Image: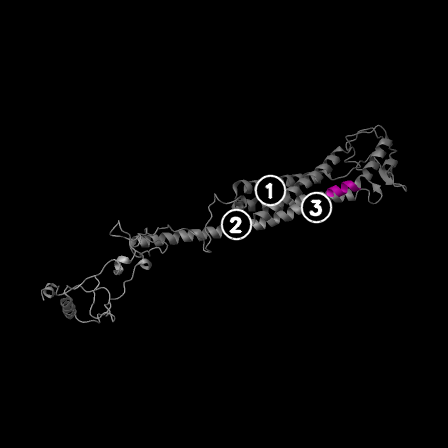
Amino acid sequence: MADTERAPAHPPRPATTVSPDTSAPTSTSISAPNTATNTNATSTAPMPTPAPRVVAPTTAMPGGLPIVSNASRGFRQKLDAGERHWRWKVALRAFLIVVGIVGIGCVGFATAVARSEKLSYEYGFDDEWALSWCLITFAISVVWCAVVVLVLLIRKAPVHPGVAVSVDLILWLAYIPTALFAIVAVLSVISWGENGRIYSYSSSGGDYLQASNGTWVWNATQYSSSRNTIRDCDSRSSYSSYSFKNCEEQDAYINAIWESKGHRAGIEIAGVVCQFIGLVFHLGLFIWACVDTYYRNSKKVSKDAEQLAADIIMNMVKSGAIIPAPSSNYYPPAQNPNPHQQPVPYHQQVRLPPPTAWTGPEPNQAMSHQSGHASEKGHAPRFA
């Protein structure tokens, strides 16, 4: 009885359910909570996790692609950013440079040959005055196209479309008269001796007639015959600044010019073709520059409208009429009251099982039964 009275009236509630031992009904042991039976003790304490890292929002294009900085772009990417159709424009300008150089060579050669002729105003071709104007348009076209290409390659941006409109307009308008002059020069070469007669522009000379063997022979005109004018090939008239040693040399010179007529006409025709190519291409570039100017002006107007709208919204925000919404790309760090212990993530938290309902006898009755058995065996109740 003394042992029974010394037993605690209300023992602590066990953490596990006591199941009766069928093999030994007279001996029942109650296990006290320890590290082996305590669920909280057996669960591993989670390691502290660092706070989520805040990443600053990055700017991206509407398509989801990141914006590439200008420093990381290549040479072609920079040209694409400055001018979308730079390949076509550079190709057209380069082609015009080649055409202008070819035209300068053709017209320059024909002009130099015309100036070297001894009978340029008396029996020669009448093309020098017409070809000289073509050199001006060719030279300006070559210089302008070279400047446009160099500016694009060096600055990675095209020239202002307004400047291109002005210069290309002047050039294609200037090509119209010079191309017509080139046509006049070619026709004068082609028509020279076409009907079998080479006329003299001097009143004291005669004409050249083409013989049956294809050579040209001098023949006195009716005006010269009436005055009994004798051909004096070594005299200098007001129309000719050159003289020959004799008349045979003059006749040979006329036949040499006739033989070179086809080659000279072909060179001048090439110059005429270059003139019209320059006219057409500069007209096309002028129209293209007008389109670029229109888009540039419309883009400028849209930018001004966007800036005006942004200023209006900013003023409304400052006045409190509009409350800006927080950014969805920025997440501030969580405020932890205990800086030494980081919060445990939800998926790492240990969930304890719900307490099991007590199905055995009441604590007082269990203790009385245990004390009774203990008194019978002569020892106090055991607590494992």
The amino acid type found where label 2 is placed reads: Thr
Q: Secondary structure at mark 2?
A: helix
Marks 3 and 2, the one that precedes in the sequence: 3
Q: Which residue is mark 3?
A: 273
12 on left or right of 189? left
Please state the horizontal and vertical placement of residue 70, each as a whole percent of the image: 47, 44
Q: Which residue is mark 1?
A: 145
Q: Quadrant of the C terminus?
A: bottom left
Marks 2 and 1, the one that precedes in the sequence: 1
Q: Quadrant of the N terminus?
A: bottom left
16 on left or right of 380? right
Measured in 3D between alpha carbons, the distance from the residue under mark 3 to the one under mark 2, in whole angstroms, is 30 Å
94 on left or right of 349? right
Q: How many circles with numbers are drawn on the protein?
A: 3
The amino acid type found where label 1 is placed reads: Cys
Residue 232 lies in what quarter of the image?
A: top right
The answer to if 263 sits in the magenta stretch is: yes
Image: 226 above or below 20: above
Q: Which residue is mark 2?
A: 293
User: As rendered, which of 12 and 106 lies closer to the eye?
Assistant: 12
Please state the horizontal and vertical placement of residue 11, each as a whole percent of the image: 16, 64
Q: Which residues are magenta?
A: 262-268
Residue 108: numbered disc? none
